[in-house]
Amino acid sequence: MSGDILVGIDGSENSARALQWAIEEAKIRGSRVRAVLTWSYMGQADSALGVGTTQPDAEEALADLVSATAGDDLSIIDQVTVNDLPVDGLLEQAKTASLVVVGSRGRGGLKGLLLGSTSRTIVERSPVPVVVVPLRD
């Protein structure tokens, strides 16, 4: 296991907030951030990438998302793209991390109290601690 803080990136405002949180935590811990974007040629719901996505597309999208959020902290961030479903890809990456950070994307009737399905499953199945950055009011 490394000391990396893994953060799931999907192009949403909340994943940018999760990345900001992970950067601040990494600076406190003296560790690195591993920003992970999962992708599929078939596209994924709630993803910044659509049908026909390729590895170079995913790498470019991740680089753009990270650089827009990281500012001067870009040097502590490793960028990883994974051709897999979000939960499976993030859980595989979590095996070599010390902490997972995801944004909440709950859309249920009790908005703000419910986690999105991806964040909920990560919390339930992660081999390491998980931080869920809540939705902004």
Image (spheres, grey):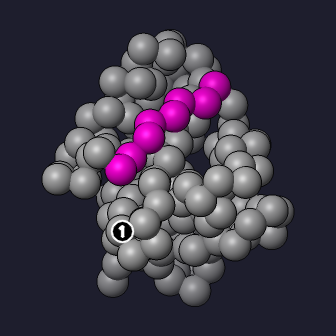
The residue shown at (59%, 59%) is 3
Percent coordinates x, y for residue 7 in the rendering: 51, 55
Q: Is residue 129 above or below residue 54?
A: below
Is residue 77 in the magenta section? Answer: yes
Q: Is 48 above or below relative to 53?
A: below
Which residue shows up at 56% across the image and 55% down it?
4
Q: Is residue 17 visible?
A: no
> Which quarter of the image is occupied by the N terminus?
bottom right
Q: Which residue is mark 1?
A: 27
Q: Amino acid at mark 1?
A: Lys
Res. 124 image quadrant: bottom right
Q: Nearer the viewer, residue 133 or 45?
A: 133
Q: Is residue 68 magenta?
A: no
Q: Residue furthest front?
A: 30
Q: In the image, is 91 to the left or to the right of 23?
A: right
Magenta segment: 76-83
Q: Residue furthest left?
A: 72
- Identified at 27% across, 46% down, the residue is 74
Image spot of residue 117 (x, y percent): 68, 61
Q: Position of residue 33 (x, y in %)?
A: 46, 53
As rendered, which of 118 and 7 lies closer to the eye? Answer: 7
Query: Tag 1's secondary structure?
Result: helix
Q: Quadrant of the C terminus?
A: bottom left
Residue 109 x/y as whole percent: 58, 80
Q: Main secondary structure of the magenta part?
A: strand
